[in-house]
Image: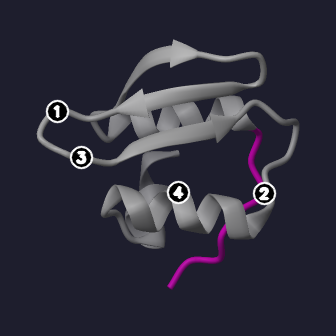
Amino acid sequence: MAKLPVLSGHAAIKAFSKAGFTSSWQTARHVIMEKAGMEVTHSVPLHKELKRGTLRNLIRDSGLTVDEFVALL
C-alpha cells in the first residue's frame, strides 16, 4: 500500500478529475465534485494542505483505493 501524500486541495481536485469526477459548483473554500452514475458528491476543501484523514475519507467515498489515487497524481 502506498503512503498517502500530503496534497493541496487543487492537486486532489486534479486527481479526482482524472478519475471521472467533474466540478459541479464551488462555495467560498470548497469545490463540490460529482461523478455520473454515483450518488456520492465530494466537498473538497481548497486548503494548502489537506489533512490525511480528510483525504483518505474522500478517496474511500469515491470508490478508489489509495494506490489507485496515488497513480492518478
- Tag 1 near tag 4, CB within 8 Å: no
Residue 52 at x, y = what percent? 74, 66
| Separation of marks 3 and 2 at Cα, in angstroms | 27 Å
Q: Secondary structure at mark 1?
A: loop
Mark 3 or mark 4, earlier in chain: 3
Camera-near label (4 vs 2) is 4
Q: Which mark is residue 6?
A: 2
**How far across and how far down the image is residue 21, in percent?**
34, 33
Q: Amino acid at mark 3?
A: Glu
Residue identifier under label 1:
36
The residue where tag 3 is placed is: 39
| CA distance separating discs 1 and 2 | 27 Å
Q: Which residues are magenta?
A: 1-8
Q: Residue lying at the far bottom in this picture: please name it.
A: 1
Q: Which residue is mark 4?
A: 58
The crowd level at tag 1 (other Cα within 10 Å; few <14, some 14-19, many 20+) is few
Magenta: predominant secondary structure element?
loop
Report crowding for label 2: few under 14, some 14 to 19, many 20 or more residues within 10 A (C-alpha): some
